Image (cartoon, rainbow, N blue to C red):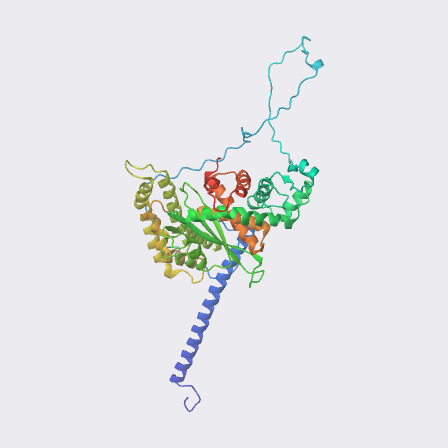
Amino acid sequence: MNRTGTPDVAELMALLAAKAAEIAALQAENQKLNERVFTLEEELALARLHRFAPRSEKHTDRVFNEAEQAALEDDAGDADTVELPETGLPDSEARQGKKRGRKPLPANLPRERVEYDLPDDQKMCPCCSYRMHRMGELVTEQLHIEVKVKVLQNVRAKYACRNCDRTGIKTPIVIAPIHAQPLPGSIATASTLAFALVHKYVDGTPLYRLAKAFERAGVPVSRGALGHWVIGSSEKHLSRIYDVLKLRLRSQPLIHGDETTVQVLKEKDKAPTSTSYMWAYRSSQDCAQPIVLLDYQPGRGQIYPQAFLGDYRGILVSDGYTAWRTLKGATHIGCMAHSRRRFVEALRARKKGGGPPEQALKFYEQLYRIEKQARDENPDDGETQADCIRRFRQQHSVPVLQALKQWLDKIAPKVLPQSKLEDAVSYTRNQWEYLTRYTEDGTMPIDNNLLERDIRIFATGRKSWLFSDTVDGARASAVIYSLMLTCRACGVEPFEWLKHVLTELPQRSNDADMEDLLPFKFKK
Protein backbone atom coordinates (compact mmCIF):
# COMPACT_ATOMS: atom_id res chain seq x y z
CA MET A 1 0.00 0.00 0.00
CA ASN A 2 1.41 3.44 -0.90
CA ARG A 3 1.65 6.49 1.37
CA THR A 4 -1.84 7.74 0.49
CA GLY A 5 -3.41 4.47 1.75
CA THR A 6 -4.45 3.32 -1.70
CA PRO A 7 -3.65 -0.37 -2.43
CA ASP A 8 -0.99 -0.86 -5.03
CA VAL A 9 -1.25 -3.11 -8.08
CA ALA A 10 0.30 -6.15 -6.39
CA GLU A 11 -2.17 -6.03 -3.54
CA LEU A 12 -5.08 -5.65 -5.95
CA MET A 13 -3.86 -8.60 -8.00
CA ALA A 14 -3.57 -10.73 -4.85
CA LEU A 15 -7.06 -9.72 -3.77
CA LEU A 16 -8.39 -10.52 -7.23
CA ALA A 17 -6.72 -13.93 -7.19
CA ALA A 18 -8.20 -14.68 -3.76
CA LYS A 19 -11.69 -13.72 -4.93
CA ALA A 20 -11.27 -15.77 -8.10
CA ALA A 21 -10.26 -18.79 -6.03
CA GLU A 22 -13.24 -18.24 -3.74
CA ILE A 23 -15.59 -18.00 -6.73
CA ALA A 24 -14.12 -21.17 -8.25
CA ALA A 25 -14.57 -23.01 -4.96
CA LEU A 26 -18.19 -21.84 -4.71
CA GLN A 27 -18.85 -22.84 -8.31
CA ALA A 28 -17.39 -26.29 -7.70
CA GLU A 29 -19.48 -26.67 -4.56
CA ASN A 30 -22.56 -25.48 -6.44
CA GLN A 31 -21.86 -28.01 -9.21
CA LYS A 32 -21.65 -30.81 -6.65
CA LEU A 33 -24.88 -29.66 -5.02
CA ASN A 34 -26.62 -29.52 -8.39
CA GLU A 35 -25.44 -33.03 -9.18
CA ARG A 36 -26.63 -34.20 -5.77
CA VAL A 37 -30.03 -32.58 -6.32
CA PHE A 38 -30.27 -34.24 -9.73
CA THR A 39 -29.43 -37.65 -8.26
CA LEU A 40 -31.97 -37.25 -5.46
CA GLU A 41 -34.64 -36.16 -7.93
CA GLU A 42 -33.95 -39.27 -10.01
CA GLU A 43 -34.31 -41.45 -6.93
CA LEU A 44 -37.52 -39.68 -5.93
CA ALA A 45 -39.00 -40.06 -9.42
CA LEU A 46 -38.17 -43.78 -9.50
CA ALA A 47 -39.54 -44.28 -5.99
CA ARG A 48 -42.81 -42.70 -7.08
CA LEU A 49 -42.94 -44.82 -10.20
CA HIS A 50 -42.25 -48.01 -8.26
CA ARG A 51 -44.97 -47.13 -5.79
CA PHE A 52 -47.72 -45.93 -8.10
CA ALA A 53 -46.94 -46.70 -11.74
CA PRO A 54 -47.08 -49.98 -13.70
CA ARG A 55 -43.92 -52.05 -13.20
CA SER A 56 -43.71 -53.30 -16.79
CA GLU A 57 -40.63 -52.12 -18.65
CA LYS A 58 -42.83 -51.47 -21.67
CA HIS A 59 -44.30 -48.48 -19.82
CA THR A 60 -41.67 -45.75 -20.08
CA ASP A 61 -43.86 -42.64 -19.88
CA ARG A 62 -43.46 -40.43 -16.87
CA VAL A 63 -46.39 -40.39 -14.49
CA PHE A 64 -45.46 -37.20 -12.65
CA ASN A 65 -44.77 -33.82 -14.16
CA GLU A 66 -41.76 -32.37 -12.37
CA ALA A 67 -40.97 -29.57 -14.81
CA GLU A 68 -41.53 -27.04 -12.06
CA GLN A 69 -38.57 -28.36 -10.08
CA ALA A 70 -35.29 -26.57 -10.80
CA ALA A 71 -32.34 -28.88 -11.20
CA LEU A 72 -29.48 -29.64 -13.48
CA GLU A 73 -30.82 -31.47 -16.52
CA ASP A 74 -28.61 -34.23 -17.79
CA ASP A 75 -28.61 -33.54 -21.50
CA ALA A 76 -25.33 -35.32 -22.12
CA GLY A 77 -25.39 -36.85 -25.53
CA ASP A 78 -28.86 -35.59 -26.49
CA ALA A 79 -27.41 -34.48 -29.78
CA ASP A 80 -25.27 -37.61 -30.07
CA THR A 81 -27.91 -39.68 -31.80
CA VAL A 82 -26.70 -42.37 -34.13
CA GLU A 83 -28.32 -44.23 -36.97
CA LEU A 84 -28.78 -47.90 -36.17
CA PRO A 85 -27.08 -50.34 -38.55
CA GLU A 86 -29.29 -51.66 -41.32
CA THR A 87 -29.77 -55.37 -40.67
CA GLY A 88 -31.68 -56.13 -43.87
CA LEU A 89 -34.24 -58.05 -41.84
CA PRO A 90 -37.98 -57.49 -42.16
CA ASP A 91 -39.77 -55.85 -39.28
CA SER A 92 -41.30 -58.24 -36.80
CA GLU A 93 -44.95 -58.92 -37.33
CA ALA A 94 -47.23 -57.19 -34.89
CA ARG A 95 -48.30 -59.47 -32.09
CA GLN A 96 -51.80 -60.78 -32.57
CA GLY A 97 -54.19 -59.73 -29.85
CA LYS A 98 -55.80 -62.41 -27.74
CA LYS A 99 -59.10 -63.66 -29.02
CA ARG A 100 -61.92 -62.47 -26.86
CA GLY A 101 -64.68 -64.69 -25.61
CA ARG A 102 -65.00 -67.56 -23.20
CA LYS A 103 -62.96 -70.67 -23.83
CA PRO A 104 -64.79 -74.01 -23.89
CA LEU A 105 -64.52 -76.13 -20.77
CA PRO A 106 -61.83 -78.87 -20.98
CA ALA A 107 -63.05 -82.05 -22.64
CA ASN A 108 -61.32 -84.25 -20.05
CA LEU A 109 -63.55 -83.05 -17.20
CA PRO A 110 -66.35 -85.47 -16.25
CA ARG A 111 -69.82 -84.47 -17.37
CA GLU A 112 -72.99 -84.85 -15.31
CA ARG A 113 -76.31 -84.41 -17.11
CA VAL A 114 -79.00 -82.30 -15.48
CA GLU A 115 -82.09 -82.72 -17.68
CA TYR A 116 -84.96 -80.28 -17.98
CA ASP A 117 -88.18 -81.33 -19.70
CA LEU A 118 -91.54 -79.73 -20.31
CA PRO A 119 -94.53 -80.88 -18.27
CA ASP A 120 -97.03 -82.95 -20.25
CA ASP A 121 -99.55 -80.12 -20.56
CA GLN A 122 -96.94 -77.96 -22.30
CA LYS A 123 -95.99 -80.59 -24.89
CA MET A 124 -99.08 -79.80 -26.97
CA CYS A 125 -98.73 -77.65 -30.10
CA PRO A 126 -100.07 -74.15 -29.38
CA CYS A 127 -101.36 -73.93 -32.99
CA CYS A 128 -103.11 -77.26 -33.69
CA SER A 129 -103.14 -78.86 -30.22
CA TYR A 130 -101.39 -82.02 -31.54
CA ARG A 131 -98.74 -83.58 -29.28
CA MET A 132 -95.23 -82.37 -30.17
CA HIS A 133 -92.33 -84.80 -30.62
CA ARG A 134 -88.87 -84.40 -29.07
CA MET A 135 -86.63 -83.16 -31.89
CA GLY A 136 -83.34 -82.67 -30.03
CA GLU A 137 -81.58 -80.97 -27.14
CA LEU A 138 -80.04 -77.62 -26.34
CA VAL A 139 -76.98 -78.18 -24.16
CA THR A 140 -75.19 -75.46 -22.19
CA GLU A 141 -72.28 -76.18 -19.86
CA GLN A 142 -71.38 -74.71 -16.49
CA LEU A 143 -68.33 -75.28 -14.34
CA HIS A 144 -69.26 -76.90 -11.02
CA ILE A 145 -66.75 -77.10 -8.17
CA GLU A 146 -67.47 -78.67 -4.82
CA VAL A 147 -65.09 -79.17 -1.92
CA LYS A 148 -65.15 -82.69 -0.55
CA VAL A 149 -63.46 -83.64 2.68
CA LYS A 150 -63.62 -87.17 4.03
CA VAL A 151 -61.96 -89.27 6.70
CA LEU A 152 -60.11 -92.42 5.70
CA GLN A 153 -60.48 -95.14 8.33
CA ASN A 154 -57.52 -97.49 8.17
CA VAL A 155 -59.07 -100.71 9.49
CA ARG A 156 -56.39 -103.26 10.40
CA ALA A 157 -57.55 -106.78 11.12
CA LYS A 158 -56.36 -108.30 14.42
CA TYR A 159 -55.84 -112.05 14.87
CA ALA A 160 -55.44 -114.19 17.98
CA CYS A 161 -55.33 -117.97 18.60
CA ARG A 162 -58.39 -119.32 20.52
CA ASN A 163 -56.79 -122.72 20.97
CA CYS A 164 -53.85 -121.17 22.82
CA ASP A 165 -56.28 -119.06 24.84
CA ARG A 166 -58.10 -122.22 26.00
CA THR A 167 -54.88 -123.93 26.97
CA GLY A 168 -53.54 -120.86 28.77
CA ILE A 169 -50.67 -120.24 26.36
CA LYS A 170 -49.96 -116.56 25.83
CA THR A 171 -49.51 -115.79 22.16
CA PRO A 172 -49.05 -112.37 20.55
CA ILE A 173 -51.92 -110.72 18.72
CA VAL A 174 -51.12 -110.35 15.02
CA ILE A 175 -52.27 -107.13 13.34
CA ALA A 176 -52.37 -106.60 9.59
CA PRO A 177 -49.63 -104.15 8.54
CA ILE A 178 -50.50 -100.75 7.12
CA HIS A 179 -48.74 -99.11 4.21
CA ALA A 180 -45.98 -96.74 5.25
CA GLN A 181 -47.43 -93.26 5.69
CA PRO A 182 -45.79 -89.96 4.63
CA LEU A 183 -45.78 -88.61 8.18
CA PRO A 184 -46.34 -91.43 10.71
CA GLY A 185 -48.72 -90.38 13.46
CA SER A 186 -50.11 -87.49 11.44
CA ILE A 187 -53.72 -87.20 10.32
CA ALA A 188 -52.60 -86.01 6.87
CA THR A 189 -52.64 -88.36 3.90
CA ALA A 190 -50.45 -87.85 0.84
CA SER A 191 -53.37 -86.09 -0.84
CA THR A 192 -53.83 -83.72 2.11
CA LEU A 193 -50.12 -82.88 2.20
CA ALA A 194 -50.12 -82.25 -1.55
CA PHE A 195 -53.16 -80.00 -1.18
CA ALA A 196 -51.45 -77.90 1.50
CA LEU A 197 -48.12 -77.67 -0.33
CA VAL A 198 -49.69 -76.64 -3.63
CA HIS A 199 -51.77 -73.96 -1.96
CA LYS A 200 -48.71 -72.46 -0.27
CA TYR A 201 -46.01 -72.87 -2.90
CA VAL A 202 -47.98 -72.67 -6.14
CA ASP A 203 -50.91 -70.43 -5.20
CA GLY A 204 -48.99 -68.33 -2.66
CA THR A 205 -51.43 -68.89 0.23
CA PRO A 206 -49.83 -68.25 3.66
CA LEU A 207 -50.27 -70.99 6.25
CA TYR A 208 -52.48 -68.89 8.50
CA ARG A 209 -54.95 -68.38 5.64
CA LEU A 210 -54.80 -72.07 4.81
CA ALA A 211 -55.58 -72.89 8.44
CA LYS A 212 -58.67 -70.68 8.22
CA ALA A 213 -59.70 -72.45 5.01
CA PHE A 214 -59.51 -75.82 6.80
CA GLU A 215 -61.54 -74.37 9.65
CA ARG A 216 -64.26 -73.20 7.25
CA ALA A 217 -64.41 -76.74 5.87
CA GLY A 218 -65.06 -78.00 9.40
CA VAL A 219 -61.55 -79.41 9.92
CA PRO A 220 -59.61 -77.60 12.66
CA VAL A 221 -55.95 -77.76 11.58
CA SER A 222 -53.64 -75.29 13.31
CA ARG A 223 -51.00 -73.21 11.59
CA GLY A 224 -48.37 -75.05 13.63
CA ALA A 225 -49.58 -78.41 12.35
CA LEU A 226 -49.42 -77.12 8.78
CA GLY A 227 -45.85 -75.98 9.42
CA HIS A 228 -44.94 -79.48 10.62
CA TRP A 229 -46.53 -80.93 7.49
CA VAL A 230 -44.43 -78.66 5.29
CA ILE A 231 -41.12 -79.28 7.05
CA GLY A 232 -41.79 -83.00 7.55
CA SER A 233 -42.68 -83.56 3.89
CA SER A 234 -39.52 -81.77 2.83
CA GLU A 235 -37.06 -83.36 5.24
CA LYS A 236 -38.38 -86.94 5.07
CA HIS A 237 -39.21 -87.25 1.39
CA LEU A 238 -39.01 -84.31 -1.01
CA SER A 239 -35.38 -83.47 -0.18
CA ARG A 240 -34.46 -86.86 -1.63
CA ILE A 241 -35.88 -85.81 -5.00
CA TYR A 242 -34.17 -82.42 -4.63
CA ASP A 243 -30.75 -84.05 -4.12
CA VAL A 244 -31.16 -86.16 -7.26
CA LEU A 245 -32.17 -83.10 -9.29
CA LYS A 246 -29.17 -81.19 -7.94
CA LEU A 247 -26.78 -83.84 -9.25
CA ARG A 248 -28.57 -83.81 -12.61
CA LEU A 249 -28.41 -80.02 -12.84
CA ARG A 250 -24.66 -79.91 -12.21
CA SER A 251 -24.15 -82.17 -15.23
CA GLN A 252 -26.01 -79.80 -17.56
CA PRO A 253 -23.94 -77.95 -20.21
CA LEU A 254 -25.60 -74.62 -19.35
CA ILE A 255 -26.95 -73.24 -16.06
CA HIS A 256 -28.73 -69.97 -15.29
CA GLY A 257 -27.89 -68.41 -11.92
CA ASP A 258 -29.41 -65.59 -9.89
CA GLU A 259 -30.32 -64.72 -6.31
CA THR A 260 -33.14 -63.03 -4.43
CA THR A 261 -33.80 -62.03 -0.85
CA VAL A 262 -35.70 -63.81 1.91
CA GLN A 263 -36.19 -62.90 5.57
CA VAL A 264 -35.80 -65.49 8.35
CA LEU A 265 -36.86 -64.45 11.84
CA LYS A 266 -35.10 -67.06 13.98
CA GLU A 267 -31.63 -67.35 12.50
CA LYS A 268 -28.55 -67.92 14.61
CA ASP A 269 -26.36 -64.85 15.17
CA LYS A 270 -28.60 -62.69 12.96
CA ALA A 271 -31.25 -60.09 13.75
CA PRO A 272 -34.85 -60.91 12.71
CA THR A 273 -34.76 -57.94 10.32
CA SER A 274 -31.61 -59.14 8.54
CA THR A 275 -31.59 -60.32 4.95
CA SER A 276 -30.90 -63.86 3.79
CA TYR A 277 -30.92 -65.20 0.24
CA MET A 278 -32.44 -67.76 -2.05
CA TRP A 279 -29.87 -68.68 -4.68
CA ALA A 280 -31.60 -69.85 -7.85
CA TYR A 281 -30.32 -72.22 -10.54
CA ARG A 282 -31.95 -73.44 -13.74
CA SER A 283 -31.20 -75.60 -16.75
CA SER A 284 -31.38 -74.15 -20.26
CA GLN A 285 -34.61 -73.46 -22.11
CA ASP A 286 -33.92 -76.22 -24.64
CA CYS A 287 -33.05 -78.81 -21.99
CA ALA A 288 -34.94 -82.10 -22.37
CA GLN A 289 -35.07 -82.47 -18.58
CA PRO A 290 -35.87 -79.00 -17.16
CA ILE A 291 -34.71 -78.39 -13.59
CA VAL A 292 -35.21 -75.32 -11.38
CA LEU A 293 -33.63 -75.28 -7.91
CA LEU A 294 -33.58 -72.78 -5.06
CA ASP A 295 -30.91 -72.95 -2.37
CA TYR A 296 -31.44 -71.11 0.92
CA GLN A 297 -28.31 -69.50 2.38
CA PRO A 298 -27.79 -66.87 5.12
CA GLY A 299 -25.61 -64.61 2.97
CA ARG A 300 -24.66 -63.43 -0.49
CA GLY A 301 -21.00 -64.40 -0.54
CA GLN A 302 -19.13 -66.29 -3.23
CA ILE A 303 -18.89 -69.42 -1.07
CA TYR A 304 -22.54 -70.28 -1.71
CA PRO A 305 -22.56 -70.70 -5.52
CA GLN A 306 -19.13 -72.31 -5.24
CA ALA A 307 -20.46 -74.89 -2.77
CA PHE A 308 -23.59 -75.57 -4.81
CA LEU A 309 -22.00 -75.86 -8.26
CA GLY A 310 -18.60 -77.15 -7.18
CA ASP A 311 -16.09 -77.43 -10.02
CA TYR A 312 -18.66 -76.65 -12.70
CA ARG A 313 -17.16 -76.50 -16.20
CA GLY A 314 -20.13 -75.53 -18.32
CA ILE A 315 -21.74 -72.24 -19.36
CA LEU A 316 -23.03 -70.05 -16.53
CA VAL A 317 -25.53 -67.25 -17.23
CA SER A 318 -25.71 -64.53 -14.57
CA ASP A 319 -25.84 -60.79 -14.03
CA GLY A 320 -22.80 -58.71 -13.16
CA TYR A 321 -22.62 -59.79 -9.50
CA THR A 322 -19.03 -60.79 -8.78
CA ALA A 323 -19.85 -63.86 -6.66
CA TRP A 324 -20.88 -65.76 -9.80
CA ARG A 325 -17.72 -64.84 -11.66
CA THR A 326 -15.57 -66.52 -8.98
CA LEU A 327 -16.42 -69.92 -10.48
CA LYS A 328 -13.21 -70.14 -12.46
CA GLY A 329 -14.02 -73.30 -14.39
CA ALA A 330 -17.23 -71.97 -15.94
CA THR A 331 -17.67 -70.01 -19.15
CA HIS A 332 -19.49 -66.86 -18.06
CA ILE A 333 -22.02 -64.91 -20.08
CA GLY A 334 -23.98 -61.85 -19.00
CA CYS A 335 -27.60 -60.78 -19.09
CA MET A 336 -28.59 -58.27 -21.75
CA ALA A 337 -31.90 -57.69 -19.96
CA HIS A 338 -30.02 -56.36 -16.90
CA SER A 339 -28.21 -53.87 -19.10
CA ARG A 340 -31.40 -52.81 -20.86
CA ARG A 341 -33.23 -52.45 -17.55
CA ARG A 342 -30.75 -49.85 -16.38
CA PHE A 343 -31.49 -47.67 -19.40
CA VAL A 344 -35.22 -48.08 -18.75
CA GLU A 345 -34.61 -46.79 -15.21
CA ALA A 346 -32.57 -43.89 -16.60
CA LEU A 347 -35.38 -42.99 -19.00
CA ARG A 348 -38.00 -43.11 -16.27
CA ALA A 349 -35.87 -40.91 -14.03
CA ARG A 350 -35.54 -38.12 -16.62
CA LYS A 351 -37.71 -35.03 -16.38
CA LYS A 352 -38.30 -35.22 -20.09
CA GLY A 353 -38.36 -38.19 -22.40
CA GLY A 354 -35.91 -39.04 -25.11
CA GLY A 355 -32.19 -38.46 -24.86
CA PRO A 356 -29.51 -41.12 -24.51
CA PRO A 357 -31.67 -43.64 -22.62
CA GLU A 358 -34.21 -43.73 -25.43
CA GLN A 359 -31.44 -44.00 -28.00
CA ALA A 360 -29.96 -46.96 -26.11
CA LEU A 361 -33.31 -48.73 -25.95
CA LYS A 362 -33.53 -48.60 -29.74
CA PHE A 363 -30.34 -50.67 -29.90
CA TYR A 364 -31.79 -53.23 -27.50
CA GLU A 365 -35.06 -53.35 -29.41
CA GLN A 366 -33.14 -54.21 -32.56
CA LEU A 367 -31.03 -56.85 -30.78
CA TYR A 368 -34.09 -58.62 -29.38
CA ARG A 369 -35.87 -58.46 -32.72
CA ILE A 370 -32.86 -60.14 -34.32
CA GLU A 371 -32.86 -62.75 -31.56
CA LYS A 372 -36.50 -63.66 -32.17
CA GLN A 373 -35.90 -64.02 -35.89
CA ALA A 374 -32.78 -66.09 -35.24
CA ARG A 375 -34.86 -68.56 -33.21
CA ASP A 376 -37.35 -68.82 -36.08
CA GLU A 377 -34.68 -69.26 -38.77
CA ASN A 378 -34.53 -72.66 -40.48
CA PRO A 379 -31.06 -74.29 -40.56
CA ASP A 380 -29.31 -74.90 -43.86
CA ASP A 381 -28.61 -78.45 -45.00
CA GLY A 382 -26.15 -80.12 -42.63
CA GLU A 383 -26.42 -77.27 -40.14
CA THR A 384 -27.63 -77.66 -36.56
CA GLN A 385 -30.08 -75.23 -35.02
CA ALA A 386 -27.32 -73.87 -32.76
CA ASP A 387 -25.03 -73.29 -35.76
CA CYS A 388 -27.86 -71.54 -37.56
CA ILE A 389 -28.48 -69.21 -34.61
CA ARG A 390 -24.77 -68.43 -34.31
CA ARG A 391 -24.52 -67.62 -38.02
CA PHE A 392 -27.57 -65.38 -37.82
CA ARG A 393 -26.19 -63.53 -34.79
CA GLN A 394 -22.78 -63.03 -36.38
CA GLN A 395 -24.41 -61.63 -39.49
CA HIS A 396 -26.98 -59.34 -37.85
CA SER A 397 -26.38 -58.91 -34.09
CA VAL A 398 -22.64 -58.22 -34.15
CA PRO A 399 -22.90 -55.03 -36.30
CA VAL A 400 -25.57 -53.65 -33.94
CA LEU A 401 -23.42 -54.45 -30.92
CA GLN A 402 -20.41 -52.75 -32.50
CA ALA A 403 -22.46 -49.61 -33.15
CA LEU A 404 -23.79 -49.68 -29.58
CA LYS A 405 -20.27 -49.95 -28.16
CA GLN A 406 -19.02 -47.01 -30.23
CA TRP A 407 -21.98 -44.92 -29.10
CA LEU A 408 -21.43 -45.83 -25.43
CA ASP A 409 -17.74 -44.91 -25.64
CA LYS A 410 -18.69 -41.58 -27.20
CA ILE A 411 -21.20 -40.49 -24.56
CA ALA A 412 -19.44 -41.98 -21.51
CA PRO A 413 -17.28 -38.87 -20.79
CA LYS A 414 -20.34 -36.59 -21.02
CA VAL A 415 -22.80 -38.25 -18.65
CA LEU A 416 -23.40 -36.84 -15.18
CA PRO A 417 -21.55 -38.81 -12.47
CA GLN A 418 -23.72 -40.89 -10.11
CA SER A 419 -26.78 -40.49 -12.35
CA LYS A 420 -28.93 -43.38 -13.54
CA LEU A 421 -27.60 -42.89 -17.04
CA GLU A 422 -24.02 -43.07 -15.79
CA ASP A 423 -24.89 -46.29 -13.95
CA ALA A 424 -26.38 -47.80 -17.12
CA VAL A 425 -23.47 -46.77 -19.34
CA SER A 426 -20.82 -47.93 -16.84
CA TYR A 427 -22.50 -51.28 -16.23
CA THR A 428 -22.84 -52.02 -19.93
CA ARG A 429 -19.25 -51.06 -20.75
CA ASN A 430 -17.82 -52.97 -17.78
CA GLN A 431 -19.82 -56.10 -18.62
CA TRP A 432 -19.32 -55.86 -22.38
CA GLU A 433 -17.24 -59.01 -22.74
CA TYR A 434 -19.90 -61.09 -20.98
CA LEU A 435 -22.88 -59.34 -22.58
CA THR A 436 -21.68 -60.01 -26.13
CA ARG A 437 -20.34 -63.53 -25.68
CA TYR A 438 -23.71 -65.04 -26.60
CA THR A 439 -23.01 -64.24 -30.27
CA GLU A 440 -20.20 -66.83 -30.29
CA ASP A 441 -22.37 -69.85 -29.47
CA GLY A 442 -25.90 -70.60 -30.65
CA THR A 443 -26.71 -72.49 -27.45
CA MET A 444 -26.11 -69.41 -25.29
CA PRO A 445 -29.12 -67.21 -24.43
CA ILE A 446 -29.10 -63.45 -24.77
CA ASP A 447 -30.28 -62.91 -21.20
CA ASN A 448 -31.25 -64.50 -17.89
CA ASN A 449 -34.98 -63.85 -18.23
CA LEU A 450 -35.83 -67.55 -18.18
CA LEU A 451 -34.71 -67.88 -14.56
CA GLU A 452 -36.01 -64.45 -13.59
CA ARG A 453 -39.52 -65.55 -14.56
CA ASP A 454 -39.18 -68.48 -12.16
CA ILE A 455 -37.90 -66.23 -9.38
CA ARG A 456 -40.88 -63.94 -9.94
CA ILE A 457 -43.17 -66.76 -8.76
CA PHE A 458 -41.19 -67.03 -5.53
CA ALA A 459 -41.25 -63.24 -5.14
CA THR A 460 -45.02 -63.16 -5.62
CA GLY A 461 -45.47 -65.74 -2.87
CA ARG A 462 -43.07 -63.83 -0.64
CA LYS A 463 -45.41 -60.82 -0.74
CA SER A 464 -48.05 -62.99 0.92
CA TRP A 465 -46.11 -64.92 3.55
CA LEU A 466 -43.46 -62.15 4.04
CA PHE A 467 -40.87 -64.26 5.90
CA SER A 468 -39.84 -67.70 7.11
CA ASP A 469 -40.05 -68.26 10.84
CA THR A 470 -37.11 -70.65 11.16
CA VAL A 471 -34.12 -71.84 9.16
CA ASP A 472 -35.75 -75.27 8.80
CA GLY A 473 -38.79 -73.57 7.32
CA ALA A 474 -36.65 -71.60 4.87
CA ARG A 475 -34.86 -74.76 3.75
CA ALA A 476 -38.15 -76.58 3.35
CA SER A 477 -39.47 -73.69 1.28
CA ALA A 478 -36.38 -73.86 -0.95
CA VAL A 479 -36.91 -77.58 -1.54
CA ILE A 480 -40.65 -77.39 -2.21
CA TYR A 481 -40.45 -74.26 -4.37
CA SER A 482 -37.74 -76.02 -6.38
CA LEU A 483 -39.94 -79.01 -7.07
CA MET A 484 -43.00 -76.91 -7.88
CA LEU A 485 -41.00 -74.73 -10.29
CA THR A 486 -39.50 -77.84 -11.89
CA CYS A 487 -43.01 -79.27 -12.35
CA ARG A 488 -44.00 -75.99 -13.98
CA ALA A 489 -41.00 -76.12 -16.32
CA CYS A 490 -41.89 -79.72 -17.25
CA GLY A 491 -45.58 -78.98 -17.78
CA VAL A 492 -46.54 -81.37 -14.96
CA GLU A 493 -49.61 -80.83 -12.77
CA PRO A 494 -48.06 -80.23 -9.31
CA PHE A 495 -50.86 -81.65 -7.14
CA GLU A 496 -51.00 -84.99 -8.97
CA TRP A 497 -47.20 -85.27 -8.95
CA LEU A 498 -46.91 -84.48 -5.23
CA LYS A 499 -49.69 -86.91 -4.33
CA HIS A 500 -47.95 -89.65 -6.31
CA VAL A 501 -44.50 -88.93 -4.88
CA LEU A 502 -45.67 -88.64 -1.26
CA THR A 503 -47.47 -91.97 -1.66
CA GLU A 504 -44.54 -93.78 -3.28
CA LEU A 505 -41.50 -92.44 -1.41
CA PRO A 506 -42.48 -93.76 2.06
CA GLN A 507 -42.49 -97.27 0.57
CA ARG A 508 -38.91 -96.97 -0.73
CA SER A 509 -35.63 -97.23 1.12
CA ASN A 510 -33.22 -94.30 1.22
CA ASP A 511 -30.94 -95.91 -1.37
CA ALA A 512 -33.75 -96.93 -3.74
CA ASP A 513 -33.84 -95.69 -7.33
CA MET A 514 -36.08 -92.64 -7.77
CA GLU A 515 -35.71 -92.11 -11.51
CA ASP A 516 -39.40 -92.74 -12.19
CA LEU A 517 -40.43 -90.13 -9.59
CA LEU A 518 -38.61 -87.18 -11.15
CA PRO A 519 -40.98 -84.54 -12.57
CA PHE A 520 -39.83 -84.92 -16.18
CA LYS A 521 -40.49 -88.68 -15.96
CA PHE A 522 -44.03 -88.24 -14.64
CA LYS A 523 -46.80 -89.09 -17.08
CA LYS A 524 -48.70 -85.95 -17.97
Q: Residue furthest bottom?
A: 3
Residue 199 in picture, x, y percent from top left? 58, 43
- Report which quarter residue 386 is drawn in: top left
Residue 211 in picture, x, y percent from top left? 65, 46
| Camera-side residue of 499 and 277 | 499
| Camera-side residue of 183 and 475 | 183
| Camera-side residue of 58 and 436 | 436
Q: Where 25 falls versus 249 (above or below)?
A: below
Q: Where 97 falls versus 141 (above or below)?
A: below
Residue 284 in picture, x, y percent from top left? 41, 45
Q: Is residue 288 left or right of residue 387?
A: right
Query: Considering the image in quadrants, where does the N terminus appear?
Result: bottom left
Residue positioned 52% across, 50% down in the render: 478
Q: In this view, does 182 lie to the left or right of 319?
A: right
Q: Where 30 falls versus 264 (above or below)?
A: below
Q: Where 87 falls versus 102 (above or below)?
A: below
Q: Residue furthest right?
A: 121
